[in-house]
Amino acid sequence: MPALCSMVRSLEQLAKDDVSSMAALGRSIMYDNALTSRVLRVANSAIYNKGISQVTTVSRAAVVLGFDVIRNVCITAKLLTSLLDNKNLSENVYHRLIRLMAQSFQAAMFTKMMLADHDEEFQEEAFIAALLYHLGESAFWSTGGPIANELDKELITVDDSVQRLNLVRQHIGTSFSQLTQGLARSWGLGELLMKSLTSPNDRTPEVRSIYLGNKLAEAFANASKDPQQLQKRIQQAAEMLKLPNAEFQKMMLETIDATSRLAVDYGAKELVAFLPDTQSALATLEQQEQWQPRQPNMTIQLEKLRELTNLTMSKPDFNQVVTVALSGMLEGVGLDRAAVMLMSPNRKMLQPRVVMGDGGDTLKAELILQIDPHFHELKACLEHGTPFWMGHQHGGQKLPASIDKVLPDNGWMFAPLRVENKVIGVFYADRATSGRDITQAEFDSFHHFVQLTNVCFSLAYRS
């Protein structure tokens, strides 16, 4: 890690020096024969060498391919070398590290593929940001030792994302994401990496591609356990690029094939066994049905509204009412995620109590809102019971930074949760998974469910 840090800082200094020559770049890494060899192999690979003559020096490679490309090739090569050469790890931790690095390398290639219509410099910057997206976790596992061994053993038995996050915090006092942010700041790894880490819901092409590139790589790594997740991510990426699914899948398979070849050129053959191969990826895609986002269904809406109406005749418990309401929002209104959030005892925070829909565990961990007095709509919702929503047509609305980081850019909805005529929390819903807009009609249906749910609570708690 220190060697990688030194290399990054050296390259950044050269990038900022307008009078530095390409030869200076060559001299800056000449002392490292292994790095020089890897850079030349990559520069002459099919990915980067577009039919030009053989490149034999780093300075020549920089002239032919450009400084930014060579800089990022150096960073990638040094990262792979620094982490893979650590022989003092237990076998389990070493395998975990290699799997994570393979996933990051595949994510970087997916990201670059999705930005193919942009210029080379833009693609390379996004490639590095995607590659370093899990740098903090990679750095932790690469250090080894008793803590890494103990955490590895405990994580093997846990699938729930919230439990995994809590285990990591218990052992190291922070999250892997925060470790990555700390390294990115101290090493000066660029604004794009920081933006992708702190604002993953940003809808700009580069941040969205980095996010989806990592999610696609993760979904491929877990395709046997959760094939539907892979189909969902493919659908999202195809929609972002405005391509038919079949065309995007063809591009994706070509990228998977290129990733394995490029890993060998980087001298990282260890990664190949943990990368998806073309044949198994194709088989996975052919076996699974195409994931489709939920669509509005009036029949289900009426059925769930009737269930809520029938519950007003009895004294139902809280969870029974909430489950019917949230399932109606998802399956009837066609939303991706829905939740009930309750206010903390000091009324300064909203925390999810019941969550349903896509990525429920993740939403429960991430959707924790500080009640910011500058978020006037939320304040009005909690104090006066006023529902509100945001869709693409409200895109210019300025939100407090703490709220903006949590809520998806394509829209969301809030409505008050009343018990005994007192607002104790909110109903929340969005379409973050599919990235679809929210319309007035969907907001009206969402609010209808909330109103009837509050009637159920009013009658249930009436003496």
Image: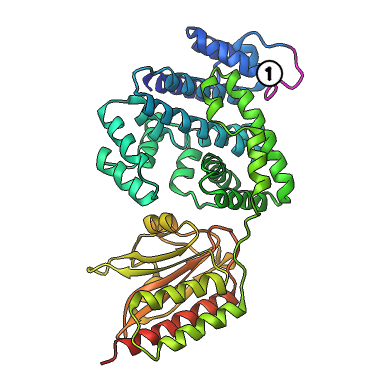
- For this rendering, which residue is in front, 273 or 164? 273
Q: Residue at x 59, y 53 (%)?
A: 232
Q: For numbered disc 1, what is the local secondary structure?
A: helix
Residue under label 1: 64
Q: Tell me where residue 419 appears, x and y as whole percent.
A: 31, 82
Picture residue at 33% right of the left edge, 49% below the top? 163
Q: Is residue 98 above or below residue 85?
A: below
Is residue 24 something that shows in the picture? no
Where does the image place residue 78, in percent across and percent down from the top left?
Answer: 48, 20
The overriding secondary structure of the stretch rendered in magenta is loop
User: Is residue 77 at all visible to an observer of this figure?
Assistant: yes
Residue 410, position as x, y percentages in the image: 55, 61
Magenta segment includes 46: yes
Q: Is residue 265 above or below residue 318?
A: above
Magenta-tinted stretch: 45-53
Q: Is residue 187 left or right of residue 69?
A: left
Task: Tell me, yes or no, whether the highlighted magenta stretch contains residue 277.
Answer: no
